[in-house]
Image (tube, coloured by chain):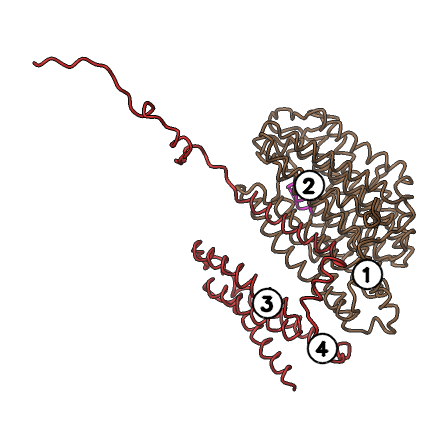
Chain colours: A red, B brown
Amino acid sequence: MTFEQFIFYIFATVTIVSAIGVVTMRNPVYAALFLILAFFTSAATWILLEAEFLGVVLVLVYVGAVMVLFLFVIMMLDINIDPLREGFIRYLPVGILVAVIVAAEIIIVLSSDTFNMAIPDPMPLSYSNTKALGEILYTEYVYPFELAAVILVVAIIAAISLTMRKRNDKTKRQNISEQVRVKSKDRLRIINMKSEEKQ
Amino acid sequence: MPEYLSEIAPAYPEIFLLIATCAVLLLDLFVKDYQRYITYIVAQASLLFTAWLVYTATDNATVVTTFNDMFVADPMGRVLKISIILITMAVFAYSRPYLKDRGMYKGELFTLGLFAVLGMMVMVSAKTMLLIYLGLELLSLSLYAMVAFRRDNKQASEAAMKYFVLGAIASGMLLYGMSIIYGLSGSLNLSHIATYLSSQEAVMSNLGLLLGLSFILVGLGFKLGVVPFHMWIPDVYHGAPTAITMFLGAAPKIAVFAMVFRLLAEGLGDMVIGWQQILVLLAALSLFVGNVIAIAQTNLKRMLAYSTISHMGFVVMGILAATEAGYAASMFYIITYAIISMGGFAVIIFLSNKESEADELADLKGLSTRHPWVAFMMLLFLFSMAGMPPTVGFYAKLSVIQAVVGADVIWLAVFAVIMSVIGAYYYLRAIKIMYFDEADKDIAPAKAGFEFGALLSVNGLAVLGLGILPSFLMSICVASVNAIL
């Protein structure tokens, strides 16, 4: 076993264990933290594959932005997880059975000759993964790239149209321009009245 | 015109639709609630113009690729795209009164619908697995949001959640299968994969390829809604607002057919023995489960959902024949089925009013005395689903069964006929309820605008006309399949 393989197996094991943690944890905050760990170790695996840029982006975007927001949401919502977990034990045997069968089949296939491929040579030191991605992203892959952008637009439209509620006009709010333009006579009314006689 | 522009000319319809969709989205911001018809008309006009662009972009014999061999414009894509667009236009027109009654008549719904059409068009003309996946995601994401659009309705939210979770699992399966095929063949491009497969000696004993193929088939099975991957169909069809169910059950089916054709026939054509065996099982199970369980349904939308499952069994039958006649028969089946199912849901929309959804079988009682013409249209749709001449359903079923017999899977053809006979029971029961049962209570006659009535009549007569003269559409299907294979 080379050193690289050793590192790979460590990261792969941590990824799998933390992925199991995501679905089995009772506390959603722990589950989210396990997901962050899974993202970190997958980023490490990508870096092992010489895809440094993708590894860095995975950490920056998913761990740095998405998961932090996600944690915020979990903490603000205070989800009661118990009703969601009803039937977990009841379905567990079937689930494990299916998982074991699928895993066994995949292991048989993966250990067959098909996947017995030569290890590719590492790229030379001057190779830059970032540059290679940049060169094809806007040229060869411009069509899929634009479509990915369209998918994000749809996600935004869907999220907004599903969550936005029109405020009714009973809410109290300030209208600053009106406040600034106000004149003393709008506020103060001077009434001419006779003084009352002394009794 | 600069040269680079003429190079992307085959993709003009998609590009135009994207720009028009964004324009509709922005336009809707400046439109007041009572002027919403402006959004509607602009959306319909952009769809119509896109259809015209598809029609003029290529002719019916050439195959053009662009975007670095990722996008293909071929005769089959042309026919499927035009059908998708026209059917979506009809669905928009049908659903207007329903959406207005339920406070769903908003610009976002049309925008999402247009994005879904864009996704379907991308799927239809995808030449790499990457684009098949991106188009599918664009379509699915829009559909999830459309199903959830009535967010205060518990049933609709539940349906959207189920659809979302199962759809995500299916996409994951599909992606995993694609990644294995990509890892082995070294390319995402379908024609490169086909070349790779034909250069391999023993494709069917290559365990890796078989693993990839089975995951892809599971993903496709979910998206088609064939047994045993059908669990989401009844719940989603029942829970979603009827207008959305109508959209869901018509145009996307055509796009999914294109996806199955591109992946299995064009990309993995050399593994035909592998996917044929699996598809035989899926088709037989779908025919059985769809037709038998539909008998027990009392809800019209659920009944139509199970009927969809059995119809998808027929579509799969045509594909598994793996002959040109088979593909053409499937293509004919899916286009005509989209037209028929749209009509069936339109009648449910017609009977529904502001207060209630008329989606129970009992709501059809006495329809023939209340609205004889609508009842006759529904009769045509149900006859067509059951596969009775002279409606188009008969010819569609006949051509699929002929293709299967031609491919020497005669037991499946016999089984399909038996299952159709069983299925005819619940279609005829609905007709009996319409024509021979008296309404329990006085029901106020349903009102519908001229547009709705005219569209329903055209839809019903199209089912009849295509049944009497099927060769018009069939010859287009055969020619477009022949031009590719």
Query: What's the magenta region?
Result: B295-305
User: Which mark lies nearer to you, 2 or 3?
Assistant: 3
| Image mark for residue A158 | none
Q: CA distance from mark 4 to mark 2?
A: 46 Å
Question: Badge 2 local density, few (<14 within 10 Å), some, or many (20+)?
Answer: many
**Badge 4 amino acid:** Pro
Alpha carbon of mark 4 to alpha carbon of mark 1: how far? 31 Å
SS state under label 2:
helix
What residue is drawn where x is 89% and y is 36%?
Answer: B468
Q: CA distance from mark 1 to mark 3?
A: 31 Å
Location of mark 1 (residue): B190
Marks 4 and 1 share the same chain: no
Amino acid type for the residue under numbered disc 2? Thr
Describe residue B264's horizontal placement relative to residue A125 as left or right. right
Q: Which residue is mark 3?
A: A56
Disc 1 vs disc 3: Cβ atoms closer than 8 Å? no
Q: CA distance from mark 2 to mark 3?
A: 34 Å
Q: Are marks 4 and 2 on the same chain?
A: no
Q: Residue B60: horizontal and vertical position, in percent? A: 90, 45
Vertical comparison of B252 with A49: above or below: above
Which corner quadrant of the image does residue A57 belong to?
bottom right
Choose top left, top right, bottom left or bottom right for residue B88: top right
Q: Is residue B53 visible?
A: yes
Where does label 2 land, which residue? B21
Give, as a three-letter code, the residue at label 3: Val
Is the residue B361 above or below the residue A81 in the image? above
